[in-house]
Amino acid sequence: MNKKILFFWIFILSFILLFNIISVCALGVTPARNTLDFEPGLKKDLSFSIINSEHKDMNIIIYAEGELAKSIILQGDSSFKMSASEESREIKYSLKIPNELRPGVRIGEIVILETPVKTSNDQNYIGATVAVVTQIYVYVPYPGKYAEAELNVVNAEQGGEAVFVIPIVNRGDLGLENIRVNIDIYNKLNEKITTINSETISIISGEKKDIVVKWKADSPVGTYRAVATVIYDGETISLEKQFNIGTADLDLQEITVNDFSLGQIAKMEMLVENKWSEPITGAYAQTNIFNAKGEVMVDFKSATQDFSPLSKEVLTSYWDTGGVGEGTYEASVYLRYGEKSSQKDLQLKVSEDNLEIIGLGYVISSGRSSSSDGNSGLIFILIVVVVVLILVNLLWFLVLRKKPKK
Amino acid sequence: MKKTIKYAIDFVLIVGTAFLLLFLVGYVRPLVIAPLDGLKTTENSVLFSFEKADTILIDDNIEFTSPEKIHVKDNLIVNLKPGTYYWKVQGISQSEIRKLTIESEIDLKLKEKDLEKGVYDIVNAGNTVLDVGVYDKEDLQETISLGIDEEKEVSGTKFIGEIKNE
């Protein structure tokens, strides 16, 4: 018996030892980047923190490199030890920006290097070195007029609004007066379906502004391409991005059960429509049926099925009703495809020779609708209170107060 | 009616109306609880906690020219990339505007795999996508891109991680 206990402890200790042998070397820094606008001769005090996320003794070496290396003056030692109890250490440095720099992004880097520490336990020794870098980006304006822009698209539901957001940064040393954006939208056949234009804005040197263009997405669901041209003071920037109208969506339309007999295996044929104008692959239905306590009584899945664009297919599931009593059961059917899923809640009315599916609406309701209803009620009450207040005041000040004495 | 009674009713109505209006304005104004104004963190997941509002608006500029609107009933955890954000909540009226900064953080971990062959697993445990330079002594062998929480097998003697250039 004692031998068994001894072997057990030897096994546990070996396991712990084996686990300890897998040693980890870790090093962190925050922030990973500091961004500055160029000002000739500017001296700026900055800092970063070295993070000892593994809480171990570390030998650290810090040095600057890159084209701004000579402008970086580290304060304190460039080589030091961090103890296991030291979670992080703040390092201060100064950046002395030269009077002249080439236009564009000028980069300086501070490298934090952990050199290997040999501990008394040699098994915890990692021979490799790890280093992390905190960067300093200095944006030097281009001579004259120069802008940088990107295109972001917020996808829209069909009939809703697609929003095009174009952040524009004036990287030149002159102000930009007439900036506007022209957006052409193409469908999948590469046919231009519309052109939209933004209003004109101006941006001073070094500043960033967003141009927002909205488009009523009354085209069929699917993938589209936006080609935006940013036009500013005679120059242009071309940008391009794909976006979707509508979302890939499968819709459970009906469930048919033929030749049902309680205690046998019920074949449930689920008619599902692909409302998306693209194929959907590997979709399947998962059904949960709940008992009276709301616990999942049974969980079954259909085989996977591929859907052509805008097509209808049948997903077949089998429910073994052995041991199931007559009655009405709550059920949820999930249509799963890729990382997406939609849920439909149903009631299954089970009798000896019939299974009736009582369909309920989708439970996917945004918090917005219910909350908006609450807000509407509250707004109504507040309006009533304010109106009553106004009436009482008017009645008093304009009528009752001026009423002549009898 | 006596003048004093008139004045008393005037006073009650004016003061009462003012109090009631102030109460209504205060009542409908959303209450923002968290995160605190000016919070700086390296955590990408931020819990927004508030009352009497159903929409969070988050933007990178205080004018909210292109806000991300998130409709929620209650508190919500939002994942944000490193950067400076302005946010407010909207119900019947709008809340104050608060500022939030997610600071970029590099956290590079190296796990020994085969010490003799110099093979390691390298993990990006920070909140930004990294470019990792893999060196054999002082010679750069390759630069690998490492997504957030991504782990890759590497072979070398020195590994330098920096934020991925845009």
Image: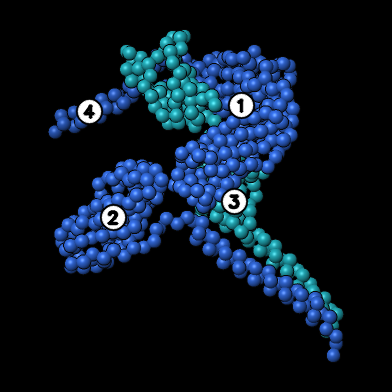
User: What is the chain identity of the residue bearing mark 2?
Assistant: A
Can you tell which of label 1 and label 2 is closer to the viewer? 2
Q: Earlier in the sequence, mark 1 or mark 2?
A: 1
Marks 1 and 3: same chain? Answer: no
| Residue at position x 84%, y 78% in the image | B4
Q: Position of residue A230 (x, y in %)?
A: 63, 34
Q: Which chain did the image draw in blue?
A: A
Secondary structure, mark 1, is: strand
Per the image, the residue denoted by label 3 is B89
Can you tell which of label 2 and label 3 is closer to the viewer? 2
Q: Position of residue A90 (x, y in %)?
A: 58, 25
Marks 2 and 3: same chain? Answer: no
Per the image, the residue denoted by label 4 is A11
Mark 4 near mark 1, Cβ–Cβ under 8 Å?
no
Q: Nearer the viewer, residue A254 or A119?
A: A254
Find chain B in the image and tell me its colour.
cyan
Q: Position of residue A274 (x, y in %)?
A: 36, 49
| Residue at position x 74%, y 19% in the image | A41
**Residue type at tag 3:** Val
Q: CA separation, marks 1 and 3?
A: 29 Å
**Residue type at tag 2:** Met
Marks 3 and 4: same chain? Answer: no
Can you tell which of label 4 and label 1 is closer to the viewer? 1
Marks 1 and 2: same chain? Answer: yes
**Residue type at tag 1:** Asn
**Residue type at tag 4:** Phe
| Residue at position x 66%, y 24% in the image | A139
Q: Earlier in the sequence, mark 4 or mark 1?
A: 4
Q: Quadrant of the N terminus of chain A?
A: top left
Q: Quadrant of the C terminus of chain A?
A: bottom right
- Residue A270: assigned label: 2
